[in-house]
Structure formats: structure tokens, C-alpha cells
Amino acid sequence: MSRTVIRGGLVITASDEIHADVLIEDGRIAALAASGTPAAEAWTAERVVDATGKYVIPGGVDAHTHMELPFGGTFASDTFETGTRAAAWGGTTTIVDFAVQSVGHTLREGLDAWHAKAEGNCAIDYGFHMIVSDVGDETLKEMDLLVEEGVTSFKQFMAYPGVFYSDDGQILRAMQRSAENGGLIMMHAENGIAIDVLVEQALARGETDPRYHGEVRKALLEAEATHRAIRLAQVAGAPLYVVHVSAREAVAELIRARDDGLNVFGETCPQYLFLSTDNLAEPDFEGAKYVCSTPLRPREHQAALWKGLRTNDLQVVSTDHCPFCFTGQKELGRGDFSKIPNGLPGVENRMDLLHQAVVDGHISRRRWIEIACATPARMFGLYPKKGTIAPGADADVVIYDPHAEQVMSAQTHHMNVDYSAYEGRRVTGRVETVLSRGEPVITEREYTGHAGHGVYTPRSTCQYLN
């Protein structure tokens, strides 16, 4: 039996803050006891971690990543090996990535392909959602089978006609199926058909710079699609999780639905909380670094997102980590913003940026843990195995120094991408040590993990449903 004791830290979960020692046995949390008490002092272990003056928090759960995603004629630049290593550096110990069904193929083929990419390569534990691109009778039957084996969420796209796009009929059919099998539909809510018209018109006017990516993907078209997705889910009697909410008008649609008692949930991402169209407008094609969908919005949208996180109208902050290098990948869109691969790097930055939000007074410490660890774990059927520090939970634990300062930079990050979306940003707080199932992956700012430690983790259904 391997034992570790973490002594002297402030243990923070979504519900409690307590000065406690933590006993870990065989990869699980065995017990907590108030620091300095006889019970805690009696514990002995091969490994003792001194967390005095530090936070002891659950490992982050990033429920929205895209490692090795094929997009726009290229691939996301992080592999499962590099991406999960970077996640660990940033205090995230579980990712849920998206397996892709290509049109004309089965869900099983897509899922098997993603298992093959990830197996033996991950530094931390991982699960999968399933992107559903081709809704037909066979796909609907397969959805039932996937739920049974622990792939309990399905993503559909109202955007990207000709690639991932589903029409309202296909969306309704998938939602009806998920209402029966307990799955959760995740929606990329943008009116892709209308956006394509605006893209064509902008390019015809010679508006080719990256900033026009944000201008054609209008906030109203995100709000319209969000409203439509909510109503389709209501017709189907199905729950709905709207991914990467960026616009205050879309937040308003979620608030209205939740006030009506509907099982509708919303996620936002650090890029929408900390970046804006000012970044998209950076000169000399630098704005291409910030092209993602939904797009960055004018800064005034941020207040509605922060408020939504405080009022629980937005429940989760994930990254939508989908990195493309500036050189050779983002550059594919020089002279035509519509050819810039969509996506930002961020899996390493999320926990630190959200701690900065605590420092800045946007959210509380417990809310930080709630939106980054506990709620994503509950939303996607991983709690209490993941997302908390409690007896029986996996010993996914981060020792976090709330006073250390760092400057975010591509020079020092561990993501396999040649720029940082947060280059030069000074933040307070830094990961010091990370345990995954009790094994040290980061030890006092050194990588001590290895590819293959992370294992595939089947999930139960959403734990928030009435």
C-alpha cells in the first residue's frame, strides 16, 4: 500500500475551506483531518508533502478539449501526449476530449480512432464526448450503446455547414434519443447558414483581415441559435448544454430558459472572459492568433459572462483548447480570414486565469473550484471520483501557491504551439505540485509524470438532471 500525506495546507473544495492534512492511500483520498490534531499527526507515509501557506485543491476537470483535431486541412498542434502534459502543468488532471464522427462513418469508427490516438499517450486521465455529424437511424441506435459504455454526451453543431453541421431535424432527432437514453446534448450554437452568407459578402467587399471573423459571426446569430437549441430541447424533453457561450445576448437566452425551469446549462471559456475583439484587430495578421468560434466579442460582453458565473446561469469554465501554430497553420488564412483554422491554446492557463479572477474579485475561491473542478465533474458523470477532495475520491490533488507571480508566455508554457493567447499577462498564483491518482506528475515545478499514466475514464450520465 502506497501512502502520501499532504500537511498544513488550506483544503478548498466547492463547498468547504478547511486547514487540513490529507491522507492518500493507493491512489485515493483515504481521510482528511484538521492540521495539528492527534489524528493527523498519527499518520505516517513514504511521501510527505508540505503544503504550508499553500492551497490544496482538486485537480481541474477540463470538459472541452480538442487534441489532434482535424480542421481546415490541418490538425490541432497538441497531441494527447503534449496536451495532457501541458494540462498537468496547469493543474488540470482530467480532460474530456471530443471524438469525431465523420459524415458517412459510424460513431464507433470515430470513437475507436480517438481511443487509438489517446491510449498509452496521456499524462492524466481522460474521457470522451462524441461529435455527431451524421444523424440517421444507425447513429441514433449507436448513441444508446455509447451511453451504456460511458460516453454519455454528444456534441452537435449549428455551425460549419458541410463539415460538422446538423440541421434542426437532425438536432431534434438526436435530442429525442438523448431524452430516452440519458445522454446530454452539447451544442455549438451559431447560425452557420447565415454566417456563411455574411462571410461570402465580407470577402466580396475585400474584408479579409482576421478582425472580420468576429464581425461576421454576429452575437445575434449566437443568441438566435442558442434560443433555437433551447426550444428544440424543450420540444424533445431533453437537457441541453451550450458550449463556449461568448455573447451577453446568448447568456440572456440561457437565463430565460433556466428561469422557466428548463434543464439548460452553459459553459464559457477563459478567452471570452479575458480577451476581446481588440485582440482580433491586432495589426500585421497577429489577430489570426485569436480566431476561434464562437469568436471573441467586444469587451463589454465580459461583465455579463462574469455575472452569469456568479449567479450560476453559467456553470462551467472549460478551455475549448484547440491550438494551431501561427507559423504554417494560422497563416493558411492570410488574405482570407475564413481559411484561418479556428481555435486557441489554453488548457495550461485555465486554472491560473480563474485564480486571477479570484484575486480580482470576480468570483470566490470556492466558486473557482466549483466552475473548474466540481461542476464539470458532475455535469459529465465523473463526480465524486473527480472534482473534489473527499474520502473515496481519486487522489487528483494540486498544491497551489496563491502568492507566486508568473508571466504567461510562449517561452515558458508547455503546450505545443508557437504563441500564447495571454503573452505577457502577469497573474498571481501558480501550480507547484500535481498528483494524479496519488502519483506525482508535477513535483515542485518539475515534470515527473509520464505518457501512459493517464487512463480512459468511462462516465455516468449528467448528475444535475431532475
Image (cartoon, rainbow, N blue to C red):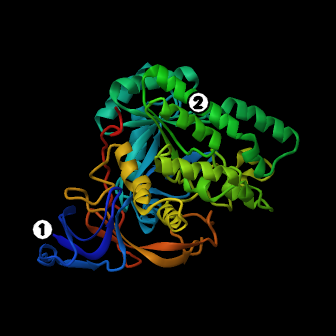
Q: Residue furthest right?
A: 205
Residue 452, above or below 313: below
At 73% across and 44% down in the image, what residue appears?
338
Q: Nearer the viewer, residue 349 or 130?
A: 349
**Residue 248 x %, y %:** 63, 43
Disc 1 secondary structure class:
loop
Q: How many marks?
A: 2
Residue 271, above or below 132: below
Packing grade of label 2 (10 A; few <14, some 14-19, many >=20) is: many
Q: Which residue is mark 1?
A: 1
Residue 233, above or below 190: above
Residue 160, above or below 228: below
Q: Nearer the viewer, residue 85 or 195?
A: 195
Quarter occupied by residue 51: bottom left
Disc 2 secondary structure class:
helix
> Label 1 sits on what residue type?
Met
Q: Which mark is residue 227?
A: 2
At 48% across and 34% down in the image, what residue appears?
258
Front: mark 1 or 2: 2
Quarter of the image containing the C terminus? top left
**Residue 316 x %, y %:** 46, 49
